[in-house]
Amino acid sequence: MDAHVECGPCVLRQALDTVRETDADVATERRAVRRTATAIGEMSFDRTPMTIAARAQAIVREETGIDDPFGDRKRLATETVADMRPALVDRLDGAADRFERAVRLAIAGNVIDVGPGHEVDIEATIDDVLDRSFAIDRLDALRADLADADDVLYLLDNAGEVVLDRLLIESIDADVTAVAKADPFLNDVTAADAFAAGIDEVATVETRGTDGVGTITDGFADRLRAADVVISKGQGNYELFSDCDASIYFLLLVKCGVVADDIGAPEGSVVVA
């Protein structure tokens, strides 16, 4: 998915939010914002939004010297959702269609995202997503493809959300490889975050490599095509992989107008695409 002009201000706001997460002084904040604005202005809009965002976040890390600005918030999000696990398992066990409910819970977790800059109420979002119709509904196709799959690639998104991803992974009767970020990016899951959430107990944990935040390496593109089923979580992964020559199921909440227009579903909708 190509970036739109609206992505520029959004990426700049993300950079400002990130530098303020570090409690940097005003001089550092100004340098980071100025460098980010310059980088955005110089980048081509035939790149994905993730390419632009990855450069912006790298600038913030360089200016602040903080490798993982959202590290504390990621740990808290994972611990908070992990505390909810017994109640969530009860909701799964009480479902008429356990797999559909696991998918819905995983999608609800996609609200735990610092990128859009919104407030997060995970319990209210779970209740909402469990009751709402899918704006794009490829659930039956996903179910059928997973029934025949041996090798499933699961592209993780955010910390906290990963606890709900684990519930879905546990319902898949195949070898699952969960793919995390190699390096910190906003509140996205790194390999360390995935291990903290116990994903290694239900899947093999891998990363896309150090250049894998805003780009798709040839090796990872081959891995996508080789998998029997690819499940991609969240908007960032949709932005990066939606034009990839592979068969990918996208599970997400639509959280901005640019993605809404591209995917063909209203902002705020629940999607299995």
Image: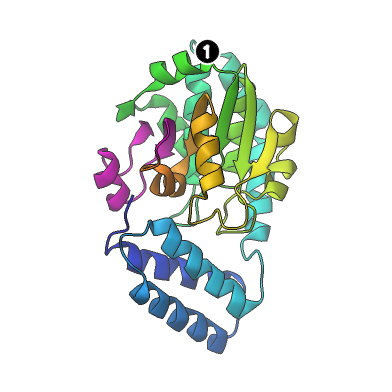
Q: In this view, does 83 lie above or below 74?
A: above
- Please say whether residue 109 is visible from this viewpoint: no
Horizontal side of 96 relative to 67 (left or right) equals: left
Does the magenta-highlighted stretch encompass residue 107? no
Residue 185 occupies quadrant: bottom right
Q: Which residue is drawn at 56% across and 44% down?
A: 219
Residue 5 occupies quadrant: bottom left
Nearer-the-camera pick, 230 or 56: 230
Nearer-the-camera pick, 28 or 40: 40
Q: Which residue is drawn at 47% across and 19% down?
A: 100
Q: In this view, does 83 lie above or below 75?
A: above
Q: Crowding near pointer 1: few (<14 within 10 Å), some, many (20+)?
A: few
- Residue 184 at x, y percent in the picture: 62, 59
Which residue in the protein does label 1 denote?
148
Mark 1 lies on a secondary structure that is loop
- Residue 59 at x, y percent in the picture: 53, 74
Nearer-the-camera pick, 102 or 150: 150
In the image, the segment drawn in magenta is 245-273
Residue 260 occupies quadrant: top left
Does the magenta-highlighted stretch encompass residue 252? yes
The amino acid type of the residue labelled 1 equals Asp
- Residue 194 at x, y percent in the picture: 68, 43
